[in-house]
Image (tube, rainbow, N blue to C red):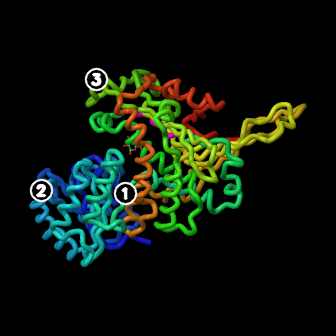
Amino acid sequence: MNAENSCVVIFGASGDLTFRKLIPALYNLYKIGKLGEHFSVLGVARSELSDESFRQKMRDALVKFEKASGPKLDEFCEHLYYQAINTSSVVDYAKLLPRLDELHDRYQTGGNTLYYLSTPPSLYGTIPECLAAHGLTTEEFGWKRIIVEKPFGYDIETAKKLDVQIHKCFEEHQIYRIDHYLGKETVQNLLVLRFSNGLFEPLWNRNFIDYVEITGAESIGVEDRGGYYDDSGAMRDMFQNHLLQVLAMVAMEPPAIINANSMRDEVAKVLHCLHPLSEEDVKNDVILGQYARGLVDGEEVVGYLEEKGVPADSNTETFMAVKCEIDNWRWAGVPFYVRTGKRLPTRVTEIVIHFKTTPHPVFSQNAPENKLIIRVQPDEGISMRFGLKKPGAGFEAKEVSMDFRYSDLSSTSSLLTAYERLLLDALKGDATLFARTDAVHACWRFVQPILDYKANRGRVYEYESGTWGPTEADKLIAKHGRVWRKPSGMMKKKV
Ligand code: BG6
């Protein structure tokens, strides 16, 4: 199904996200025919730009990042427009009315409007209020939807307040809280792997699974986002949203049907079952770290405290490892070890399901426990690890693997990127892969004790850049007799 006729209004149109992700996503959707001719994009920001200069900026970005060229690029740019307003001033929003009327008329978009908040979070409450003051949120003439980027709140209290503010202007069915991890093909594939195969689901529980590891590692540092990052840390930047959403996909119950309500009911249910962390649990089961100087990919890199925009005495975590538990029948007693960090040895997101070993060792030496490795990125794929007999005398077992790589599918080139998929879904009115308010609150509730610990300047361990975080993170899991998998850059090519 293609996008419905509509106008996409991007607030924060002069920002990075717009030209790095949003415009490229819309361009690619246009190129493959998912966005017909009846669409327009209205960029909105404070800077004074004409339609022409906005088009030129976006065209340059498309050429640079997407290697775009040819008539499709020209045609796409014709659909781009720009309006400068002071986004904090309600009066200024009046300028949007004639622009939108004109665009809806020209492109026959029937008043359908998708607002995208790609601004600093301090404006997430203001923009909806200003739009509502001008009647721009009502659905009498076409649908109105709003996409809100993360962070959705700063903690549980601000998340609730923001919700109240936005709900005064938009109803829940109009609100799309974007988490780009849910747009990743391999995260969605988890659902297909689990719920469309008879093989895995019977084993997917406490009787057969020993523990689960979820890793979201990055080799980059904070780059030029030191100012933003120092307020967020790994917890608000990656854990509270992306990784807890991935955890929900691993742990949720099968929905009766894949649609926005049933899916999101199950996601919220499992997130509500996260075992609340007591102060004692935070001390025992949470490790925070901050990168120091070191070598990444053979290059010397500076420590976090030396990054631009970071205060010299910052206690912000760039790494965290947490042992989570889920209080329900399926998962009682199965730890989920989740870790994320910047300046780790490689960029990899993966989920490892560790199955229990055999009840009785028949051979003198068992193979290591069976594992299912779901590689979210890069080298997207799935690897099943199990034991077979080592050739030769005796019955020694060795670990072998059966691998599936996405790149082996001939149609991989037509995979949509996360932003393409999610923008298209929002333009079709499908909120299945967007976070619902109850799930967002459940995530904040779970991390709140860690935020409190942090606010009291709880211990943050230093780790050398290019390593897998502080050694305390190894101890966190070693005390239960387990070790983190150290994923390499690539999935093994051959068994
Ligand atoms: C963003 C974070 O949401 O996700 C970044 O703000 C992080 O700090 C990025 O680098 C990771 O996304 P991906 O898709 O590259 O894994």
**Crowding at label 3, few (<14), some or many (≥20) Cα neighbours within 10 Å?**
few
The kind of secondary structure element at disc 3 is loop
x, y percent for residue 254: 59, 62
Q: Are marks 2 and 3 in contact (CB under 8 Å)?
A: no
Q: Is mark 1 within 8 Å of ligand 1?
A: no
* Disc ID at residue 177: 1
Does the image show residue 20?
no
Does the image show residue 434?
yes
- Amino acid beneath label 1: Arg
- Amino acid beneath label 3: Ala
The kind of secondary structure element at disc 2 is loop
The kind of secondary structure element at disc 1 is strand
In the image, what residue occupies the spot 28% across and 49% down?
61
Location of mark 3 (residue): 312
**Crowding at label 2, few (<14), some or many (≥20) Cα neighbours within 10 Å?**
few
x, y percent for residue 450: 42, 37
* Disc ID at residue 89: 2
In the image, what residue occupies the spot 87% across and 32% down?
392
What range is drawn magenta here? 215-220
Looking at the image, is mark 2 or mark 3 earlier in the sequence?
Answer: 2
Q: Is residue 254 magenta?
A: no
Looking at the image, is mark 3 or mark 1 earlier in the sequence?
Answer: 1
Position of 279 with respect to 195 (left or right) is left
**Crowding at label 1, few (<14), some or many (≥20) Cα neighbours within 10 Å?**
many
